[in-house]
Image: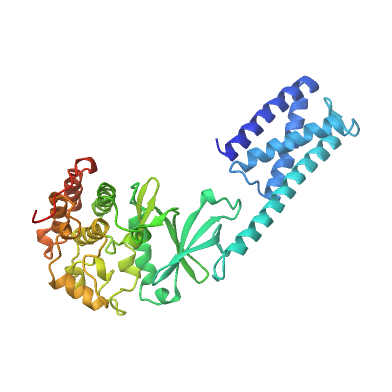
Amino acid sequence: MNRETFHLIGYGALFVLALVLMIMVLGNLLGLAVMVGIGCGIGLLSESIYPSPFNNGRLSATAIGLTGALVGNAIFGKWGPSLAHVYFIPALIGALIVSAILRAKVRYDRLRRIEDLTASAGEEPLAMSMVEQYRLIRFVGAGGFAKVFQGVPDRTLRESDSVAVKVFSDGAMEQADFVARIDREVALCQKLEHPNIVRIYKSAQQNKLRYIIMEFIKGETLRSRLQKGRMDIPEAVNLLIELAEALAHAHSHGVIHRDVKPDNIILTAQGCKVMDFGLARQAGTSDLTQTGSAIGTPHYMPPEQILGEKQLDGRCDQYALGAMGFEILTGEKLFDGDEAIHVVIKHVQDEPRNPREIRPQISEALANCILKMISKDRDDRFPDMDAVVKELKTLKPEAIALARPIGT
């Protein structure tokens, strides 16, 4: 039971107890109505002046005001105008005092919290600023065209209600038709509802800031995980299945990622999350070129994307997933080089190594699956991502046998 639920149950029990006591003490419904009216009125007034930290702010404020009215009526003496054993002035004073005490504590706790967040926010200029009703409490990371922040509702500052706010750079805003492209892509991506895809809530602009508000995921990127070493084979296959299912869902809704890479995969205790669906190609600049003639990341780009073909389909994501699968299983990139141009030339011209040459424990079936996904000719790959999912599911972790090294 979380803290908020505990508080609401407590307020509910207090409310019921107060009603019982009022009925017993006051002896009639008119007195009960007067007391409820005083408590409700003062509670809602205090709620409008300084919001309650609870989700059900009006309900909690009413309960607090009613409690104060009951206490005031019982303790502050029986004087002033009254009706059916309810003394207006004591009840009013009690409701005001109890509500004021809570609001003062809430305000004090809030100021202390903001001070702590400000101290830990660092020197990022946008940290602790407001975007809509969210306060940007923490800088998460940056790409070539945007910065991402963790935002919390300014009303409560609760991190359990966090969102991710991606704020685009001035350079991105200067691109022709940038806003229209982002809005179109966001509208398309909002249709995606899959447990392994980060949800996008809205795209908007505030003053000169253009931003996207999306689901906040707490975890580490796949890139960070791979820096610790390659994955166990069962773990890698499970991850590839989740990613393939997410991409298959996106493709079924007409969304092609075009920038599948470890940096865009978040690993959590519940599974993986794919982010930046459909946005990199529209808004980002390439790692390969400043002109944007090829959009993507060199280590995971299929040949047709490198060569600038316009009619890309889901098989470009399949190639990227295969290249990433190669890295997850072997601990080495599919192709590497000192310069981006060297990497993309290898993607277009060089044949990939068999993953088993690097890690003999990879089964032949799994190695063949990866090699099929990274075929140079997209017609030699699986026809779609659903076929990839089906193939990978035949290679369930518990069914993967340790393969003998090649040549033995």
What colour-coding does the image apply? rainbow
Front residue (pair 272, 386): 272
The reply, left or right, for residue 37 in relation to residue 237 is right
Against 4, residue 281 (above or below) is below
Most extreme residue toward the right, as rendered? 79
Q: Residue at x 66, y 49 (%)?
A: 51
Front residue (pair 158, 66): 158
Q: Position of residue 56 (x, y in %)?
A: 60, 41
The reply, left or right, for residue 25 in relation to residue 392 is right
The reply, left or right, for residue 138 in relation to residue 7 is left
Residue 27 appears in the picture as rendered:
no
Against 171, residue 5 (above or below) is above
Q: The N terminus appears in which quarter of the rendering?
A: top right
Labels in figure, total: 0
Q: Position of residue 114 (x, y in %)?
A: 64, 58
Q: Position of residue 146 (x, y in %)?
A: 42, 69
Q: Residue at x 68, y 56 (%)?
A: 112
Q: Specify the quadrant of the image occupied by residue 36.
A: top right
Against 222, residue 394 (above or below) is above
Most extreme residue toward the front, as rendered? 408
The reply, left or right, for residue 103 in relation to residue 403 is right
Residue 350 appears in the picture as rendered:
yes
Q: Specify the quadrant of the image occupied by residue 400.
A: top left
Q: Residue at x 76, y 45 (%)?
A: 101
Q: Position of residue 330 (x, y in %)?
A: 23, 58
Front residue (pair 42, 148): 148
